[in-house]
Image (cartoon, rainbow, N blue to C red):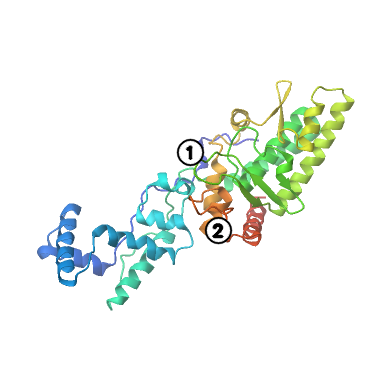
């Protein structure tokens, strides 16, 4: 069986635009400027600048529009569970917040946070805020969001193929399919980027503590490596793959195969951990080979798992700063492994427990 569907059919297609509405009371105040005339944004800005100059002259203050607008982000820091939600509301350029590219929150998450802040401001002026009722159930953001039912089907397809190949296929073909299966689980659980030789060495795993050290990108401005706590299911899967590699090494030794040392090196941690048999050679996983292997079952970009994980963990209630730590999306100075970080093993363990629940729903 295979998923012979176009990429568009596998995606949930969130919207790219979402409107945050002002309280009706504030909108009426803006609409009342100059006798109810409708103004362009530039006209409203001119009116506000004129009003601020008058206030500054009377009160000896130094208000500007940029200072007032910039206060919004500061107020939301104490209210939001995800710094990316703040950047979305404040209109920060996605180039400064990489996590935006992977995130597709439900509109209600943004509108409720925005409304809570508006309500606090209006309460200070003894005004009760009211809002226009609109559909807040849509998602907005990343367009590479795979519908959950297709992720479930992907693992069902791969499990079925493995069972069939265990009975009928050559051991090299089964090994490659098993490696693809292990890679998909590891990548989805850790948010590993699709690079050459992913999960590079067996020594990067510490199954006793249940952790994985990840360093799959370069950064000149801060720490690039991170540590994640592996879900129990992933720990068991790595242990099974170790047993499989040992079996392959023994089998290759009996057959006097030239590839025996690569399997032994994979187990020792001296060579690439995830190996594929390709055209008579034993090679580490590469993005090009993954694209070829997945083209008949999941024909979408290889980093779909990072998009799925960023959004799903937030849906599960994991705070945004923990999700950023898991995916390596922290901003400069906020690195989870930095000297001033308060992140603990227990925090990452909570993410792993949530992922265990996610994987149980995926089959």
Category of crowding for the residue at label 2, using alpha-carbon neighbours closer than 10 angstroms: few (below 14), some (14–19), many (at least 20)? few
Category of crowding for the residue at label 1, using alpha-carbon neighbours closer than 10 angstroms: few (below 14), some (14–19), many (at least 20)? few
Whether residue 315 can be seen here: yes
Residue 164 higher or lower than 252, as above or below: below
Query: Mark 2 sits on what residue?
Result: 340
Indicate the quadrant containing the N terminus: top left, top right, bottom left or bottom right. top right
Q: Please, what secondary structure does the residue beneath circle 2 have?
A: loop
At horizontal 64% and vertical 50% (from top left) the residue drawn is 227
Q: Viewer-proximal residue, 242 or 271?
A: 271
At horizontal 24% and vertical 70% (from top left) the residue drawn is 25
Residue 253 coordinates in the image, percent (x, y): 87, 27
Residue 326 coordinates in the image, percent (x, y): 58, 51
Give residue 125's quadrant in the image: bottom left
At horizontal 79% and vertical 37% (from top left) the residue drawn is 268
Query: Mark 1 sits on what residue?
Result: 8
Give residue 280's quadrant in the image: top right
Label count reads 2
Give the mark nearest the N terminus, 1 or 2.
1
């Amino acid at each position: 069986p295979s998923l012979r569907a176009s990429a568009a059919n596998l995606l949930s297609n969130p919207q790219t635009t979402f409107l945050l509405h002002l309280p009706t009371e504030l909108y009426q105040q803006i609409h009342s400027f100059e006798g109810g005339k409708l103004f362009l944004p530039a006209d409203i800005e001119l009116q506000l600048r004129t009003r601020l100059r008058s206030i500054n002259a009377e009160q000896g203050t130094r208000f500007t529009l940029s200072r007032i607008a910039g206060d919004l982000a500061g107020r939301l820091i104490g209210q939001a569970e995800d710094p990316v939600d703040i950047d979305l509301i404040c209109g920060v350029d996605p180039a400064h917040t990489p996590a935006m590219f992977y995130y597709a929150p439900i509109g209600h998450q943004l509108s409720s946070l925005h409304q809570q802040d508006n309500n606090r401001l209006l309460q200070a002026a003894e005004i009760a805020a009211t809002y226009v009722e609109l559909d807040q159930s849509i998602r907005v953001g990343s367009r590479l969001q795979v519908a959950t039912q297709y992720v479930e089907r992907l693992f069902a397809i791969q499990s079925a193929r493995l069972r069939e190949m265990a009975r009928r296929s050559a051991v090299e073909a089964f090994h490659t399919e098993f490696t693809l299966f292990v890679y998909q689980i590891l990548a989805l659980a850790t948010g590993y980027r699709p690079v050459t030789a992913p999960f590079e060495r067996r020594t990067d795993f510490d199954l006793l503590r249940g952790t994985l050290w990840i360093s799959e990108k370069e950064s000149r401005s801060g720490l690039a490596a991170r540590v994640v706590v592996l879900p129990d299911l992933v720990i068991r899967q790595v242990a099974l793959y170790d047993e499989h590699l040992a079996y392959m090494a023994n089998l290759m030794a009996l057959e006097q195969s030239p590839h025996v040392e690569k399997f032994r090196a994979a187990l020792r941690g001296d060579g690439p951990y995830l190996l594929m048999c390709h055209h008579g050679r034993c090679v580490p996983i590469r993005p090009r080979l993954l694209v070829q292997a997945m083209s008949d079952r999941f024909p979408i970009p290889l980093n779909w798992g990072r998009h799925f994980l960023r959004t799903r963990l937030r849906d599960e209630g994991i705070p945004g700063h923990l999700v950023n730590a898991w995916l390596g999306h922290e901003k400069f100075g906020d690195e989870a492994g930095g000297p001033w970080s308060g992140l603990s093993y227990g925090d990452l363990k909570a993410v792993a427990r949530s992922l265990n629940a996610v994987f149980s729903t995926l089959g």
